Amino acid sequence: MSSDGPTLNDESYAAARRGDGTQAHGHGHTHSHGGGPAHSHPLTPGQEAHAHGRDGDGDGVPGGSRGAGHDFALPALPGAVDVFDTTLRDGSQQEGLSLTVDDKLRVAEQLDHLGVTFIEGGWPGANPKDVEFFARAPTELHLERATLVAFGSTRRAGVRAEDDETLRHLVDARTEAVCIVAKSSEMHVVDALRTTLDEAVAMVADSVAFLRSNDLRVFLDAEHFFDGYKANPDFTLRILQAAEEAGAETLVLCDTNGGTLPFEVERIVGTVLGRFETQVGVHFHNDSGCAVANSLAGVSVGATHVQGCVNGYGERAGNADLAAVVPDLSLKLRVSTIPPERLPLLTPVAHHISELVNIAPNPQQPFVGASVFAHKAGLHTSAIARRSDAYEHISPDLVGNGTRFVVSEMAGRSTLAMKAEELGLELDSEAMTSVLDSLKQLEYQGYHFEVADGSLELLLRNSTGWRQSFFDLESYRVIADQGAALSTEATVKVRVDGERIVATAEGNGPVNALDGALRGAIGSRFPALDGVHLVDYRVRVLDSAKGTGSVTRVLIDSTNGDRTWTTIGVSENIIAASWQALSDSVVYGLLHTVGSDV
Ligand SMILES: [Zn+2]
């Protein structure tokens, strides 16, 4: 690594660790743009200690308050950063992630709803899907806040910018802004592009100038920047300089292989910021598990544009997860990202997007995961009931998530009481005893309510005397038929408001067929069911405690777009277990969509 970077990072690093982000120097970063080294104020260990306290200012962020009374100069973080989401371009490189044009439009709407600054829509001209997306976007996508960005690359080697097809497609995409990728590592220029370093610089200069002459705002993604900088800093800086001189709005430093570590980011981004007037952005991949940390490190030394994907989608280990970068910056470092009033949309939007891209949400995803504010029975739960910040790093409401008490057979009365309170149910002591007994009995049979919040809620409601009134099951039947092809057919007989309804449906398997038949039977009475669908189905065979053979446990995840819930069924018969989980899923969905009279 080059040693010519100014040593200005100690203070920023310490501030990030303190999580205090006091903006004593006002907005903007400290670096003198002329390239001179900024002075630093190393902290002494004693000074550092007192800022670690719990939430003293009631903002729901322990220790995350401004102005904790330091008497030494504090680092200046930028006042605000631009949030640039690339789910529709870089994120779509993820294995197994495939979006239709309609999906892409819906994802863009969600991102706009969340309040990101820029949405990278794809690569116009590269494939028919992205061509159609950019053709439809001007009329079908009504962005309230975000700016749509088209992605492309610099002109090819040896071709004039005005004759280059990729640049032409970018102009034709009719967006206000474009982002072009440029090779900024000597190795890639020589080995992959097989051209000279001078030509690589000229490609950047010509391409940016051409796009600017077409009145486009231009972001330059400097590919393999960090690796390139370590090998040949002069060349990578020449690439940035060419972009700056030609009028690029933002110089985005990309860690394309994702192998860079936070201390290197601070050093290298700091150096770049010391040399350029133009806004600097960062783009990190997560191959070292540091994409979010690296993004914060980049901002901590003055980058004011952060690229990533909500939910961290992307090839290999993914891109920086904006669902973590945004709250870390906004809540902990006090750097403005999305509008503060939209921060509580983070969890619903992250879940909505995972539904649109059809990838089950990761329950352990920081800030927005279903498990990240969940507390299991025992010490934790009683402590958290007394003091919510005891085991939570922020108040979950701030990001639209919520505290959950996980209930299992180990649950004591207090856990169950808190769960009931969370659901707004009143359980008297008799009901409480009966629920605790059934929980223990059912878990012995193989149920696992800790992971099936939907079924647990129905169990608790039933203990108060509530019965679902949406439908009464008379019978169901499933037939699997191996003819020319294997087909599955299900018939469901139910009563709704006294009327007997029989419906049959085909499916690609028994659960799918039963789901279709049940929807066929009651769908017209409950149109809201249209918005409820299954997102995941998991089966596990358990050794039976009774010793009469194995039992099957089925878990079904469902969503109505806003919330996701899990239901469970256990039986020696896989169809019966599936029906239980399915029927609970539908009842839960109706209960929380149509409502109930309890
Ligand atoms: Zn990337």
Image: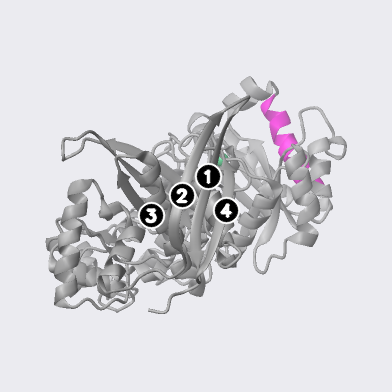
Looking at the rendered structure, the secondary structure element under dot 3 is strand
Residue displayed at 53% across by 71% down = 339
Closer to the eye: label 4 or 3: 4
Q: CA distance from mark 2 to mark 4?
A: 10 Å
Residue position for label 4: 503
Residue position for label 1: 490
Residue displayed at 16% across by 55% down = 440
Q: CA distance from mark 2 to mark 3?
A: 22 Å
Answer with the quarter of the image where residue 465 lies.
bottom left
Q: Nearer the viewer, residue 274 or 364?
A: 364
Q: CA distance from mark 2 to mark 1?
A: 7 Å
Could you tell me the amino acid type at mark 2? Tyr
Q: Is residue 403 visible?
A: yes
Secondary structure mainly formed by the magenta segment = helix
Residue displayed at 44% across by 52% down = 475
Q: Position of residue 264 (x, y in %)?
A: 41, 41
Residue position for label 3: 566
Q: Return the disc, 1 or 4, that comes first in the chain's sequence.
A: 1
Q: Position of residue 145 (x, y in %)?
A: 65, 68
- Mark 4: give few (<14), some (14-19) or many (20+) Cα within 10 Å: some
Looking at the rendered structure, the secondary structure element under dot 1 is strand
Q: Return the disc, 2 or 4, that comes first in the chain's sequence.
A: 2
Q: Return the disc, 2 or 3, that comes first in the chain's sequence.
A: 2
Residue 476 image label: 2
